[in-house]
Amino acid sequence: MVRTILTPDNTHIQLDIPSEYVGREIEVTFLALDELKEDKPKKTMGDFWGILSDETADQLREHVKKSRDERERDI
């Protein structure tokens, strides 16, 4: 795998593909790293009020409780 971070100074980037990747399907992705660092408000159970059925909400609450209990036990 080849991964690098750069700051382009124009709209053109040339890529040299390693010879072992020739003829293989590869993924090329670009994104601005500052977009990943945006602080998004964290969701709470209250954000899903009225979206989930009572049964689904109870199942989710029970799953979260079990996960927390297991994590506490492992610490």
Image (spheres, rainbow, N blue to C red):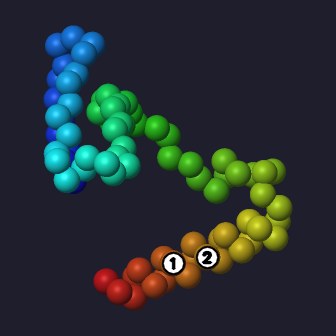
- Residue at image x 74%, y 66%? 57
Dot 2 lies on which element? helix
Query: What label does residue 63 carry, if any?
Result: 2
Disc 1 residue type (three-letter) = Ser
Single out the residue that lies furthest toward the front. Answer: 23
Taking depth in this image into account, of 26 and 61 the one nearest to the observer is: 26
Q: Considering the image in quadrants, where does the C terminus appear?
A: bottom left
- Residue at image x 77%, y 68%? 56
Q: In this view, does 67 lie above or below 40?
A: below
Q: Position of residue 18 (x, y in %)?
A: 16, 45
- Residue at image x 56%, y 82%? 66
For mark 2, does the 10 Å Cα neighbourhood hold few (<14), some (14 to 19), or many (20 or more) residues?
few
Q: How far apart are marks 2 and 1 (CA)?
A: 6 Å
Single out the residue that lies furthest toward the top. Answer: 10
Query: What label does residue 4 carry, if any?
Result: none
Dot 1 lies on which element? helix
Q: Position of residue 60 (x, y in %)?
A: 67, 70
Q: Where is residue 45 in the image (x, y as percent from the top left)?
A: 64, 56
Q: Where is residue 23 in the image (x, y as percent from the top left)?
A: 31, 48
- Residue at image x 29%, y 33%? 33
For mark 1, does the 10 Å Cα neighbourhood hold few (<14), some (14 to 19), or many (20 or more) residues?
few
Quarter of the rendering containing residue 35: top left
Disc 2 residue type (three-letter) = His
On the image, numbered disc 1 is attached to which residue?
Answer: 67
Q: In this view, does 71 lie above or below 56?
A: below
Position of residue 52 in the picture relative to residue 20 (left or right): right
Residues at discs 2 and 1 in contact (Cβ within 8 Å): yes
Quarter of the rendering containing residue 6: top left
Taking depth in this image into account, of 1 and 19 the one nearest to the observer is: 19
Q: Is residue 66 above or below residue 35?
A: below
